[in-house]
Each structure stands twice: as structure tokens, then as C-alpha cells.
Image (cartoon, rainbow, N blue to C red):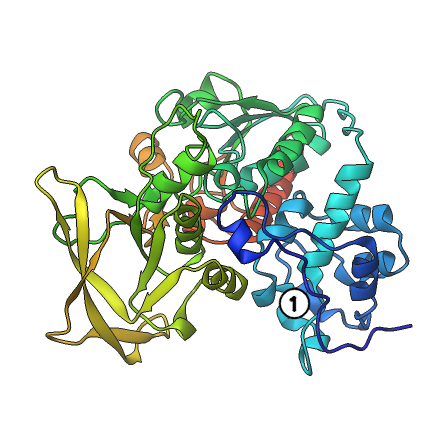
Amino acid sequence: MPNMSLKKNPMPSQEPDIRNKNFQEVALGYTAEQAMDEAQRCLNCKHKPCITGCPVMVNIPDFIAEVAKGNFEEAYQIIAATSALPAVCGRVCPQESQCEKYCVRGIKGEPVGIGRLERFVADWHNSNNKELPEKPVSNGHKVAVVGSGPAGLTCAGDLARLGYDVTVFEALHLAGGVLVYGIPEFRLPKAIVQKEVDGLKALGVTIATDTVIGRTISIDELQEEYGFEAVFIGSGAGLPMFMDIPGINYRGVYSANEFLTRINLMKAYLPESDTPIQHPKTVAVVGGGNVAMDAARCAKRLGAAVYIVYRRGMEELPARKEEVEHAEEEGIIFKTLHNPVEIFADENDDVNKVRCIRMELGEPDASGRRRPIEIPGSEFDIDVDCVIMALGTSPNPLIKDTTKGIQFNRKGGIVVNEDGLTSRDGVYAGGDAVTGAATVILAMGAGKTAAKAIDEAIRAKA
């Protein structure tokens, strides 16, 4: 019988005052009974509008119908037909602005919890199916993938299943890209990412870590000396942005990238960690996106009092609503309509306060959001010993500086056509290296598009 409740089944979670002191996953996941009950809220619409909001076109109504009947493995296989990372997407995709945005149930209530159901199905599969995929028969063709983030992993997986000999080159010592260095354990357990990487290895994909393309090996060498017939660049957008204000170089000022990498990849919060990190008492995180929320919530778990300083209002925060709510529940203080103008330090150059100015919103800017305007004479100081800049990132210029024949836009992104092909023959790109910082699922969609185009191009030449 359909479930006509106007609200989603709530997601079981750790209590805020417990979770803000540990790095264990916040959301605990649905039980089988909760998942089946939530799935029965789906109307199985004839026109399936939710699919149009999914960048990888998961057949959402069909997988949910299987969940409603208790056929969890069948549901997983439907998702896996188009999505390479369902356990990841179920946790970190902004479903509220993608698939769930188009859910008919959302017109008069809350949409079906599509992301929560995807997570449940993927977790059920991972707990009940321990077999790794079999390696396909080789087709004799070689492809290189630069970067092991969501775009690279998706492209590599799709090509490996078609029989390609794929090598993924990763600059860091662990595969996973932003999934391991950028997203905290309490949002995305790293064991889930490792399982996906292990699945790729079982398909025959070679993962070459500690290899910086553009430094260790060039794109030219991959094509001309190593014999790769195509190269996919999914190197992400890891170059952080900083404010141009006095004091930005004092000790205790971090980019969110550095702060999160030390915590997520190097486990700097553990006493036995080999990488140092400041355990601050009071932190100002500058920015309002998901990365700012991640940095703030990590700092809270290190024992700090945390402020989020954002130049627009609460309604304009670009972070997911769920992440903002979790941050508020965990005791993080939002200083919206404020902007830093200077950072101060003591005689040892250690940060001891940040000066902010109050803002008000004016007319919309080019992005359509109301432009923040300083209120003269409204400056005030916050005593802090750490400032984390979470203002966005851009693609690392290393490939641009070491590779000829590839066109880049003014923001450093690689220019591609609709198939992900760059201006250089045989070189494709996708994900944040093209778009700048975006979502995991959009990067996956770009990886799928490029894999299909690479396969078609190589077959056409064979």
C-alpha cells in the first residue's frame, strides 16, 4: 500500500553533542523497514521526472520499486548500471537540487528520500556481497587517467569494463582524490572509497600513486613514450583561493584544502599521526559552502569554538541545507553578513584575532545573488588563534604550464567539447579540472561521457 506521508522517514543520526567530539559517521542510515517504508512514498510517475535531475541518469523509480518489495540486490544492480559510486553519491550528492528537486511528492510535501535510499541499497550490497568483479577480457588498447577522484574513477571503471588496459595516475599516496582528502570521515567513511578502488583494481585497473602528471611524467610522454592511445584528465581543482587582506601569511592561517587534507588523508586528529596540525582554541572559517562546513565541523571535533564568517546572509549560504543544519546543531556559530578585513598576530607571528566588517545586501551581482556591501565604521574584532580560508578552488596550473596543444579558459579550466575532448587529439578531460569546483555526481557524469567518447574514437581507428 502506498505511503502517502508528506514527510520523509527521518535519517537516524548520532546526537549532536556526541558526534561533535568524534569523526565517526553522523548519519547512521535507514533500517530495511525504514527503507521499504520510504520507497512506498514513490508514485512511480509515468514520466519519471526525477531521472532528468540525475547527471548519470540512474533509473530512480525502478530501483525504488525494488526497494519497496525488499529486493535490495536487484535495486543495487539497477543503480550500478549507470552509477559507479552509489555508496558515495548516496552520502554526498546534493539530491535536493538534483533528482529530489523534480520529485512530484515534493509539490505538496517533502520529496522521496532518493539519496537516503541509494545509500541504503549500496550499503546493503556492500555488506552482503563480498565478491569482487571479474576482470574482463582485454581488448588490447591502453588508456591513461590522470587523477583518481570521482571523474577519474568513473572513467577508468567504464573503460575497464569494456576491456581497456587502464592506468590511473594519482599525485597523492592514496587513491580517491577529493573523496579521501576533501570530504571528512564523518560524512564519507574512507573504507567506502577504498572498496570502490579495490573494485577497480579487480577489473584490472592499475593505480600509480605518488605520480604527478606534468612533473613526474608529462602528457607528451604518456602519449608518445608509454603508448597510451587516449588520456583522460580528471585532476580536479585543488588550487586554493585566499583573500587579499593584511595578515594572510601569519601562522595559523590555513586554506581549507590544507586543513582538510591533513585531517582526512593524514588523520592528523589522531595522537599517533605523523603529520602535525594545530589544535586551535577558537577558529574563524571564512566562506559559506560545503567545504567551509566541513572545515568548521572538523575544527569543532578538534575541540575548538568555531565561527563561520560569511559575507552574505543565512538564506544565501551555498552549502547544502543539511550540512548547515548539522553545523548549527553541533554548536558552530554563524557570523553572516560579515567579512574579514585584516588578520592580526602576536610577537611570534601566531594569529590572535581577525578584524571583520559588517555587510548589507545590495542589488544582485552577475551570479544573480544580491551583492554584499560594507557598512562603513562597523569593524569589530574576534579573538581567534586560527583562520581557515574556504573561498573556493581553481584547477592546478601544472598541466597548463607543462602541456602544449590544450586550450584553457581564463579561470584555468580545460576547454572541452560535448564529448569531453580537448583541443589536443586523444586528450579528454572532465570534472573540476574543466568546470572548477562542482559536485561529485557532475564529475562522474563527465567521466562517463569521456569514457564513451574514448571507446568510440579508439574503435573507429581500429
Position of residue 346 measured from the top left corner of the image (x, y, whole percent): 11, 44
At x 65%, y 35%, the residue is: 196
Position of residue 291 measured from the top left corner of the image (x, y, whole percent): 42, 52
The one of 320 and 59 positioned closer to us in this rendering: 320
The one of 43 and 287 positioned closer to us in this rendering: 287
Query: Which image quadrant is residue 203 in?
Result: top right
- In screen coordinates, is 352 left or right of 408? left
Q: Report the residue marked by disc 1.
A: 100
Residue extending farthest to the front is: 17
- In screen coordinates, is 180 left or right of 29? left
Position of residue 113 measured from the top left corner of the image (x, y, whole percent): 70, 64
At x 90%, y 58%, the residue is: 69
Amino acid, disc 1: Glu
In the displayed structure, would residue 360 be above or below residue 341?
below
Mark 1 is surrounded, within 10 Å at the Cα level, by few (under 14), some (14 to 19) or many (20 or more) other residues, namely many
Position of residue 361 measured from the top left corner of the image (x, y, whole percent): 28, 78
Q: Is residue 207 something one can see in this rendering?
A: yes
